[in-house]
Amino acid sequence: MEYRELGKTGLKVSEIGFGAEWLERHNEEECLKIIRHAEEKGINILDCWMSEPNVRTNIGKAIKGRRERWIIQGHLGSTWQNGQYVKSRDLDKAAAAFSDLLTRLDTDYIDLGMIHFVDEEQEFHKIMDGGFYEYAASLRKKGVIRHIGMSTHNPHVAKLAAESGKIEMILFSINPAFDMLPASEDLNEYFDEKTYRKMTAGGIAPERSELYRICEGKGIGITVMKGYAGGRLFDPHTSPFGVALTPIQCLHYALTRPAVASVLVGFDSTEHVDQAVAYENAGDSEKDYATILSSAPYHPYSGQCTYCGHCAPCPAGIDIAMVNKLYDLAAMHDEVPASLKEHYRSLSAKGKDCIACGGCEKRCPFGVKVQSIMKKAENILA
């Protein structure tokens, strides 16, 4: 298992993580089996947004005596009322639900205290300027949560969070289908077939590209939800591309986005765990989402670098995908941060070393003008 820094939190998380939602349908013995199997495979981050009491208790029993092996994402505002889940900003209800989470997980702290499910900009401002954020900050001050995060599906809200100076990491929905769509305050739109008629002609929606670059630049780590788009990407009939992707291809797509540290996969069995962690030993051809997308009946990625690595190998030794990523990060700033320039200088081969052979452009599935970008990168980063 590979581990990545989660922004500036100081935490190192497994790049394959555990989204525990599906455990709600399992009993104690089954939960323990799946969680322990994931642990054996090197997974060390688990998201528990669910408020249902039994699943919380079962997770707590599975990690009992092994708490230090897990980085827990626990949510503030996910409550259980009258036998059902309710998202709530009522501080009394949110505090009671969070206390219940601590009790049932048998722990006195949560690593990542997530302000739960904020998809509306108006709600974001209300939370950040009011008592709800103050409640989260008080928990951090007491050490009950170690870091404050936020979960959202809306790139506009995620950008506000990343730029707030108050949110340390973000749980965000990322997959190649969602990345094509304009921002929405209604999660259901991301799963509506009609929505994909509004696909951005130029590839990844600009607000999402900007979000990833902002998070990378500010050290705001991202953990990923909806990496498989609810399984829709595995079937050509439900995939908006008209072709099926594999779990490994979906994972590789998410893990090649700037700032992403871990993809939280929903596990319903030990076999699902094995399918996901197979990513760690997969070859380049198995991870290759770009060829699939470029040959799909429907795709709008032409001309845009997705950092897929098909441009390699470069006879001049340039890590072309990395130079492209640094250039994209730099291009969003009026004044290029010194950290980006230093990262560029540390590369063993840079844009100036391009010999203009054109091999990278022939191999690129999306027709990116690599030679031009190498010149631009050298101009603004050197």
Image (cartoon, helix red, strand yellow):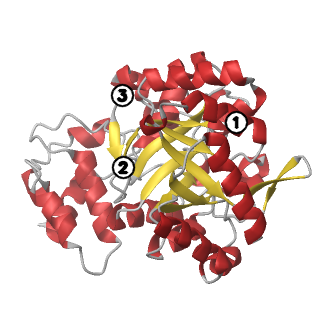
How far from the left and from the top, in percent, is residue 300? 54, 49
The residue to which callout 2 is attached is 11
In the rendered image, is residue 197 in sight?
no
Residue at 36% over, 60% down: 216
The quadrant holding residue 361 is top left
In the rendered structure, which amino acid carries the disc numbered 1?
A: Thr
Above or below for 153 versus 134: above
- In the image, 378 versus 51, the foreground residue is 51
Q: Which quadrant of the figure has residue 313?
A: top left
Towards the viewer: 298 or 209: 209
Amino acid at dot 3 = Met
Mark 3 / mark 1, whichever is N-terminal:
3
Q: Which residue is mark 3?
A: 1
Quadrant in which the C terminus is drawn? bottom left
User: Image height check: is 172 above or below 134?
Assistant: above
Q: Is residue 188 visible?
A: yes
Horizontally, is 169 left or right of 76 in the view? left
| Residue found 11% across the figure and 36% down from its top | 315
In the picture of the structure, the residue carrying the numbered disc 1 is 57
> Could you say where residue 164 lies in the image, as x and y percent from the top left?
48, 77
Placement of 215 over or under 55, stated as above or below = below
The residues tagged by marks 3 and 1 sit, at their Cα atoms, a distance apart of 27 Å
Q: Is residue 307 left or right of residue 201?
A: left
For the residues labelled 2 and 3, the Cα–Cα distance comes to: 15 Å
Q: Residue furthest top?
A: 271
In the depicted view, which residue is nearer to us: 81 or 211?
Answer: 81
**Point 46% across, 40% down: residue:** 253
